[in-house]
Amino acid sequence: MIFSAETRWFFSGRVPHEIDDWFLAGRRRVPHRGADEARVDHYLVSPGCDRVGVKLRNEVLLEIKTAIGNPQRLTLVPGIEGYLETFLKWSCPDRSVAGIESADPRPWVPVRKNRSLLTASLPAGCHAELTRIELTGALHWTFALEAIGPVEHAHALLLECGNRFFELRGTPPLALTLERSLSYAAWLAGSAARRPPPIHGGERGQGR
């Protein structure tokens, strides 16, 4: 069980080249061979619920992430605004959970991710993330800042992380606004109304 504070933004389409260049500015001395991690996570769709996220990571790790308190409006630097949220996370690293998304009659949505993390020069326990996403054939991407630590210090640690990151990188070439600031659970809940019905347990692989 861990506590984390997070601010995240979502966008549709491919990651713009200028965002890649901006995010990777601190890694130019090390050759970059694509994303740090590629995986498929299956998210449990819970209509009307944007405060709790349940996912199966890489088929073997069941994770539950629940929001604590209400989102807080956050301005890191001029032109960069988002909602700061605090989460409590549980993980079950057990291979017995493999296939749960097929056995469960409730809908699970596969989300393909190519995820890059930056931790250099940031406070301990912090990282910046740029992730390419594919959801039901559509491309999206997300940028986030996350701080992991005791719940009473998580907010302050995230502020320190954000201030340090934007001090090093400067203002991003694309606006980070409140309208685009969502948790994964909230983003998936909003996407559910705009996409085809997700796969239900027992339907995976049929008709293909």
Image (cartoon, rainbow, N blue to C red):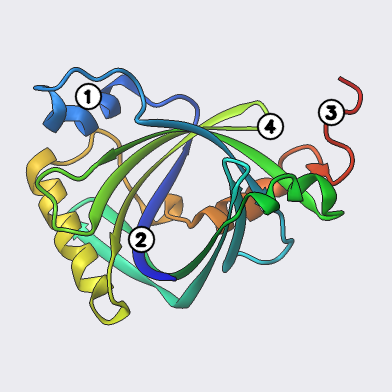
* Type of amino acid at the residue the image marks with label 2: Glu
Q: Secondary structure at mark 2?
A: strand
Which residue was labeled with disc 3? 205
Query: Are circles 4 and 3 on residues that touch, CB within 8 Å?
Result: no
Which badge, 2 or 3, comes first in the chain's sequence? 2
Q: Position of residue 4 (x, y in %)?
A: 35, 66
Q: Position of residue 118 (x, y in %)?
A: 23, 41
- Give the class, few, some or many, for how many residues have Cα within 10 Å of label 4's Cα (few <14, many ≥20): some
* Label 1 – label 2 distance at C-alpha: 23 Å
Residue 57 numbered mark, or none: none
Residue 172: name its quadrant.
top left
> Which label lies toward us, 4 or 3?
3
* Label 2 – label 3 distance at C-alpha: 35 Å
Would you place residue 43 above or below residue 140 in this image?
A: below
Which badge, 4 or 3, comes first in the chain's sequence? 4
Which residue was labeled with disc 2? 6
* Label 4 – label 2 distance at C-alpha: 25 Å
What residue appears at the point 23 percent right and 33 percent down from the top-left corner? 23
What residue appears at the point 59 percent right and 61 percent down from the top-left corner? 53
Foreground residue, 23 or 152?
152
Which residue was labeled with disc 4? 136
